[in-house]
Image: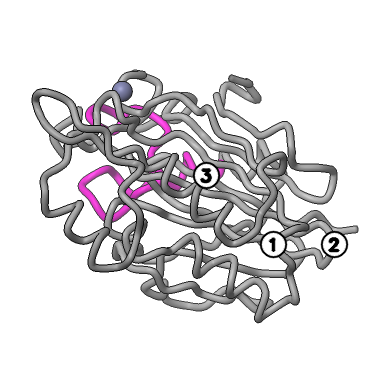
Amino acid sequence: MKTLNGIKFFSSPLFGEGVVHGFLTRLGGVSAPPYESLNFDARDTDLKENVEENRSRFFNTFGVERLMTVSQVHGSTVFRLNGDLPGALPEADAIITNTNGAAIGMLTADCLPVLIHDPVNRAIGAVHAGWKGTALGVTINTVKEMGRAYGSKPGDLIAALGPAIGPCCYKVGENVMEEFLKNWRGLDSFVPLEDGLRLDLGAENLSQLLYMGVPEKNISGSAPCTSCTRDFFSYRRDNGRTGRQLSFIMLKDM
Ligand SMILES: [Zn+2]
């Protein structure tokens, strides 16, 4: 874990000079319990001024001027950002762009954030993958859309799987498995234990990247479990009364 201006975050060693990125923890902001402290979600009952202060700390710390997020709906729609940020947040669970200096981000509290960089065609993607989006193949869609929009080849892509709830803590029902089967997903990421099924979101999204042809050596993972580690907001551990941490990536002006 790294610290900059009090903000604690994780990063991938695989991303090169072309991008700024980070998987932020909940540490280093101003929000009060149960949103303490680096909460980016203004929809809930956290004070707007606290979320604004958290955002400005993030902007100052990482040299970001514009951040695009989306209204995340647990689907598999990929939003393509061209130049200016849209006035209202579109409903989507992934963003791709080749616009310099515009950070794209996902807000999570257990769901898996995935960041992608195409250093050859200079394009990036950010994905929000909960179990529903994962079942629908949101990560596959994002790689496909980067290909359509920017000519990105999977073999050139660099990807990082961020902190999400791990199979250690993610008990799921049979309905989740049924949804995977309905969408022709494999079931390798389900871990059957005596007290029920566990889902490994990281493993399934890793297989989606590999299936698309992203080389394994270009993918980093091994982020801590959001439920086991108090440094993260965890929807499940905190019974829904919690904030959202930010994961972001931005193409640097060159
Ligand atoms: Zn855990």
Pointer 2 local density, CA inside 10 Å: few below 14, some 14–19, many at least 20: few
Residue 58 image offset from top left, x and y in percent:
58, 40
Question: The residue under label 1 is which amino acid type?
Answer: Pro
Image coordinates of residue 54 in percent, x first then y, are 47, 39
Identify the residue position indicated by label 3 in the image.
247
Would residue 207 be found to the left or right of residue 197 on screen? right
Name the side, left or right, on which 228 lies relative to 214.
Answer: left
Quarter holding residue 226: top left
Q: Does the magenta stretch include residue 20?
A: no
Image height check: is 217 above or below 65? above
- Please indicate whether residue 147 sits to the left or right of residue 206 in the image: right
Q: Mark 2 points at which residue?
A: 120
Q: Which is the main secondary structure of the residues drawn in magenta? A: loop
Q: Residue 154 carries which label?
A: 1
Magenta region, residue range: 32-56
- Work out whether residue 69 or residue 119 is closer to the camera in this orientation and state it: 119
Query: Tag 3 or tag 2, which sits nearer the N-term?
Result: 2
Residue 43 highlighted magenta (yes or no): yes
